[in-house]
Image (cartoon, coloured by chain):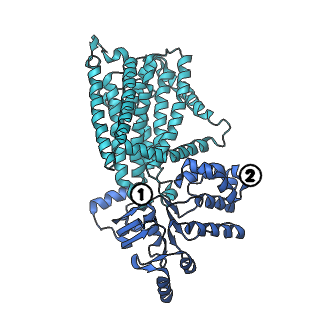
Chain colours: A cyan, B blue
Amino acid sequence: MKENRFYLKIYMFFLLAFIVVAVLFHFATGEQLYYRQTAAGLEEVWTGKHYIEIATVFWVIFTLFYVHSVWRFKKGKWDLIFTTSAAFKKYGFLIRQLVERDFKVRYKRSFLGVLWSLLNPLLMMTVQYIVFSQLFQPDIDNFPIYMLTGLVIFNFFTEAVGLSLGSIVWNASLITKVYVPKYMYPVTKVLSSTINFVLSMIPILVGMVLTGETFTRALILLPYLFLCVIVFTMGLSMLLSALMVFFRDIQFLWGIISMLWMYLTALFYPISIIPDNFRWVLELNPMYCYVSFARKIIMDGISPEPKTFAAAALYAIGSLLLGSAVFKKLQDYFVLNL
Amino acid sequence: MELKTKIVEAQRISMNFRLESNQPKSLKEFVVTALTRKSKPVCFQALQDISFMVDKGEVIGIIGRNGSGKSTLLKIVAGIMKPTKGAITCHGNIVPMLELGSGFDSELTGRENLFLNGAILGYSKKYLIEREQDIIAFSELGQFIDEPLRTYSSGMMMRLAFSIATVVNPEILIVDEILAVGDAPFQEKSRARMLELMSGGTTVFFVSHSLEQIREMCTRVIWLEHGHLRMIGQTKAICDLYEREG
């Protein structure tokens, strides 16, 4: 009975968190949940009217999932909520140590240290601003911020994937000598890039002030975007780091692919220069979805359309499911190929 | 009242390695072999059909010639490798001492490496903070503990690594040769620490080429030959036989 009360307590905690998030979300999205701007004028969107119903459906699904998890956990089987949080408790110290190591080593012998996390995007922005402002300035208002939001998100993505790509291969001496859950290696790499990602939001905020952008309630949605981007990156990182063990060619391919991907994400140019028949490339590109999401809340100061939220979450979850499934399947064979 | 409990159970484990020479190394090779299907991979059987059970507190010696599968067996017990066939269950936390100083980073200080290496070996934060002073004292590093590792001599590094690895009291300890590092006095000290660890009621898997040490330490011995379990049983009987066969 005491045990059941424990599960109920956690359930209530989740409920409370859910209500807070749902209310905040409703507040932050505001009008965009109800109306959509089209060529013909404002159009009603069904999500706003049915917000309570949607939230309820979410909660019912979560409840079923929670009950299922409790049931599995009690039987000692793997489940998403309890086993995972137990693992994080057990390996939290290790994760922290590994992330701290990455962070310390990165700036250890540099004079400016952590400041580079802020300076890097700023300097990069300056260089690219000088180059590209000559090309596209007239088409985009507030070009520096337009570019910076895209750059920061995309840099996080390429840096994190690039680092975790070799996390299994380059830690071969550890993996063959000590047992540590192997997902630890790509996950810690993504987490250490996340610190940089969060820090590089500061230049964006500074830039917003300097260029006279207004701070709106839509900015509350940033954590949602961050979460989606990080989860998406984590999925891809796991996938590629696992495949890398078997095909070392991936490290060379990734250099090319990330460059191509960058040009397909419309970081420096207005999307209007893309012919209509190629627009689908952008629409199917998860990174473009995230970048335009960020631009919407930072530059336009309004929330994106409901379907953008769904797309952002779906890309993230899809990537994570694929990545972790492949990783799980291959991880037992890593040690034989290192 | 102490019940004899099975702490490690190995059931018919086999381990196959695909030989490097016919493994696809790149995407191109992979596609080519997948399309042509010319040859079935040739496997090397490192272990075949090994079963044993180990009770809590036993010290198990593993002997055999080079290439008989001793290290593979240790890695399987440690959970680093998964056997191709069969199953192994271990109850309790395992500290593998297959290599000292796993994950050391030369840019970090000795103290930072102490925590990093400790975390990799699976110690908790609380435990490490409690034992931090002991570890530093045992390593005899003194003030150098806050210097970056890249300034250490190899002896200093090994002393630190040894001190971190042996501060624990694990339920299962896996030892590949008794490690004696550093200069003569430290070697003596580290040997004593190893023996103390191994006789402290933990379950130990111990690989050594020194039959003397095996006779001294072990309660039972596993004899491997070409990946087969040649014999398992009392230390004296097996060691005598092993010596006679040379």
Image position of A291 with respect to B227: above or below: above
Question: Going 45% across and 44% down the picture, which residue do you hit?
Answer: A88
Question: Going 57% across and 53% down the picture, which residue do you hit?
Answer: B118
Q: Secondary structure at mark 2?
A: helix
The residue to which callout 1 is attached is A334
Type of amino acid at the residue the image marks with label 2: Gln
Determine whether label 1 and label 2 are within 8 Å by CB.
Answer: no
* Residue A137 x %, y %: 48, 19
Closer to the eye: label 1 or 2: 2
- Horizontal relation, residue A109 to residue A334: left or right: right
Type of amino acid at the residue the image marks with label 1: Phe
- Horizontal relation, residue A21 to residue B130: left or right: left
Image position of A93 with respect to A330: above or below: above
Residue extending farthest bottom? B244
Is the residue marked by circle 2 packed among few (<14), some (14-19), or many (20+) residues within 10 Å? few
* Residue A20 x %, y %: 40, 24
Q: Chain of mark 1?
A: A
Residue at mark 1 to residue at mark 2: CA–CA distance: 40 Å
Residue extending farthest top? A41
Question: Going 42% across and 55% down the picture, which residue do you hit?
Answer: A245
